[in-house]
Structure formats: structure tokens, C-alpha cells
Image: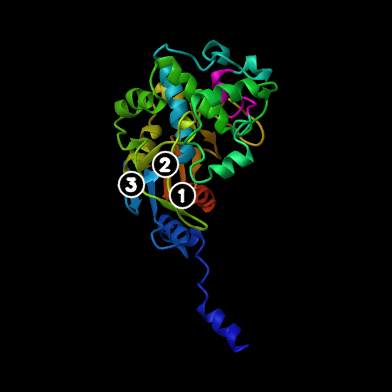
């Protein structure tokens, strides 16, 4: 009995609900860092126009993970504005092979909105492949392997269903890279990042982070780079978010639905939330979240150097509070 009482006395008190906290962003940081290994750090920004609240280390590099897919779609929109290609173009117009079945009907916009019918990962990235390459699963996946996987894939009725796909995002990046004759990250930097003053985002060199078992190293990418290879710091993600609060016409065009239905509504790159647009990211060592609401001039960014599903849940809750819901 005494032992159970001592345990109860030593237990960490439950966190205050976000809506009851005088500083919801600080409450999010506390929850994410609570009981975490030493070295885990949440960097958070709450943005209301030009007014910005920063927590953590704004210049620290984090892997952005699948937030890279928003930048991938942004490059597609930019290349369309330049007249290089169109999101309505068929994959077959720009790539030497297409999937079997209805693959000939895949359009580039399907690759950017998780509606192509392609699987989450290429078929040859089997469980055994992932186990053999668990520490760095994408580093050796090259353009030849990607093309073979596309030819072996089978899809049905592109545009009719939503299914999250790193395969599709990576394929879109490879298509654009081949079209402009540059590596994807280089093309993105020249056409999107540098012109918008976002030099703090790219394929950089973040430190290791953490998962449930301890410290792990960042991932490297080859042909599937556009699915998740970007890194960035909080300061640059704030600048990125502020651009999306006042998007130019090409950017604004991405904030209209390319897929509408269950389980997600998707714009070009961005996923539609309840009154805002968002995306998250996750690698072995990092978890990230960004949400923007141009109508209410509000954005939220959360970067964590630990793999944690709580980042998206807390990001959604923080965004709802900041929007006044």
C-alpha cells in the first residue's frame, strides 16, 4: 500500500489542456519534451501575419520529411507558370514508362495529390528491403529502380481515390528533374527556394535525432528525394509560412482541390483541414507539422527532433486554438 502511495506521489501530473493554458504553444512544447530523452527539442512558431511567437532554437536544422511534398508541388506549379509542363499533362508525355492497367491516364496533378492510384512505396521496396536498409531506407533507391517499379505497378482509375504515396511524390520529382535536366533539389532551389529567399531549406546536414529506442541518424535520398529529403530551420519555415499567408497567383492556385472525398481533400501538395491547409512529415529521427490559413492570416509550425505521432495531433489542436475555434 505504502509503495503504491509513493508511486502516486512521484508520478508526473497530467498536462494542462491546451485550451486552458495561458500559452498554448509553450504547452505543446512541454508535452512534446515531457519524459523525452535528453536532447529532444521542440521548435515551434505561432504566426499571426507579421507577429511571430518563437519557441526552441529557431536556427537549428530539422529534417522536414514529407513537408517536402508541398515544395515538390510548388515546383510543379512554378514549372507550369514557366510553360515547361502542366499539371494536366499525362505522365506518359514526360516519362518513358507508365503503370499497367489505367496507368496511361495518370496526370501530373494526380502525383501531387495522392490520387494517382500508386501504392505508398514502390513494389520493390519490400519488407525485406526495408529491414535490410532500416537505418537509411531511401539512400540506395535510384532512378533505374524507380523506372522499373513504375513499369511493374498496376493502377485503376487515377483521380478516383485518395491513397498516400511516397512512390507518386518521388516519381513526380523525377519527372521534373528529367524535364529540366537538373537534380530535383537543385531545380527546386533555383526556381522556388532562392527566388523566395528560403535559403535555409534544402538538402542540408541536420544532426541526428531520436526514436523510441534512442538516437538515430538522418536519412539520405536518391530518386525518391522529392518525397521527403528536405531539411530546414524554424526561421525559414516561418518565412515560408508567411509567404503562404499572402500567396501569389501561382501559389494560390495550389490551394484549390485536386481531389475531394474520403479520407482526405487534397490541393496541389497541401492537404485541406477544417478551414486551413496543412502537411506533416516524419522520418526515423524527426516529426514536423505546418498549417496555414490565408483567410485568417494564421500559421503554425512545429519541428521536433524525435519520431512522434503527437506532433500532428498537437499541431492540429494548436492551429484550431490560434484560429479562434
- Counting other residues with Cα less than 10 Å from the Cα at mark 2, is it few (<14), some (14-19), or many (20 or more)? many
Mark found first going from the N terminus, 3 or 1? 3
- Which stretch appears magenta? 107-118
Q: Which mark is residue 285?
A: 1
The residue that disc 2 covers is 298
Question: Can you identify the residue that label 3 sits on?
Answer: 52
| Secondary structure under the numbered disc 3 in the rendered image | strand
Of pointers 2 and 3, the one earlier in the residue sequence: 3
**Of label 2 and label 1, which has the lower sequence position?**
1
Q: Quadrant of the N terminus?
A: bottom right
Near mark 3 (Cα within 10 A), the count class, few <14, some 14-19 or many ≥20, is some
Q: Is residue 202 above or below residue 56?
A: above
**Where is residue 86 shown, x and y percent of the image?**
49, 14
Q: Residue at x 45, y 28 (%)?
A: 72
Q: Secondary structure at mark 1?
A: loop
* Residue appearing at x 58%, y 44% in the figure: 131
Amino acid at each position: 500500500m505504502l509503495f503504491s502511495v509513493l508511486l502516486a506521489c512521484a508520478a508526473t501530473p497530467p498536462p494542462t489542456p491546451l485550451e486552458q493554458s495561458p500559452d498554448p504553444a509553450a504547452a505543446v512544447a512541454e508535452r512534446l519534451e515531457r519524459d523525452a530523452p535528453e536532447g529532444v527539442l521542440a521548435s515551434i512558431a505561432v504566426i499571426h501575419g507579421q507577429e511571430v511567437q518563437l519557441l526552441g532554437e529557431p536556427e537549428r536544422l530539422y529534417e522536414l520529411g514529407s513537408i517536402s511534398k508541398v515544395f515538390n508541388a510548388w515546383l510543379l506549379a512554378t514549372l507550369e507558370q514557366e510553360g515547361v509542363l502542366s499539371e494536366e499533362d499525362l505522365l506518359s508525355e514526360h516519362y518513358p514508362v507508365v503503370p499497367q492497367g489505367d496507368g496511361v491516364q495518370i496526370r501530373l496533378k494526380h502525383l501531387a495529390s495522392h490520387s494517382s492510384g500508386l501504392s505508398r512505396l514502390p513494389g520493390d521496396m519490400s519488407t525485406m528491403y526495408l529491414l535490410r536498409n532500416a537505418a537509411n531506407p531511401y539512400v540506395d533507391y535510384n532512378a533505374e529502380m524507380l523506372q522499373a517499379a513504375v513499369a511493374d505497378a498496376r493502377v485503376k482509375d487515377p483521380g478516383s481515390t485518395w491513397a498516400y504515396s511516397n512512390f507518386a511524390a518521388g516519381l513526380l520529382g523525377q519527372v521534373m528533374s528529367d524535364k529540366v535536366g537538373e537534380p530535383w533539389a537543385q531545380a527546386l532551389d533555383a526556381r522556388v527556394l532562392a527566388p523566395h529567399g528560403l535559403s535555409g531549406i534544402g538538402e542540408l546536414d541536420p544532426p541526428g535525432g531520436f526514436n523510441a529506442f534512442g538516437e538515430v541518424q538522418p536519412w539520405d535520398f536518391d530518386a525518391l528525394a522529392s518525397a521527403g529529403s528536405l531539411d530546414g530551420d524554424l526561421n525559414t519555415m516561418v518565412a515560408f509560412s508567411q509567404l503562404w499567408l499572402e500567396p501569389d497567383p501561382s501559389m494560390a492556385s495550389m490551394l484549390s482541390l485536386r481531389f475531394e472525398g474520403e479520407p482526405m481533400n487534397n490541393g496541389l501538395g497541401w492537404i485541406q483541414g477544417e478551414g486551413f491547409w496543412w502537411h506533416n512529415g516524419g522520418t526515423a529521427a524527426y516529426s514536423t507539422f505546418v498549417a496555414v490559413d490565408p483567410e485568417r492570416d494564421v500559421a503554425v509550425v512545429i519541428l521536433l527532433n524525435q519520431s512522434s505521432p503527437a506532433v500532428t495531433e498537437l499541431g492540429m489542436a494548436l492551429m484550431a486554438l490560434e484560429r479562434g475555434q
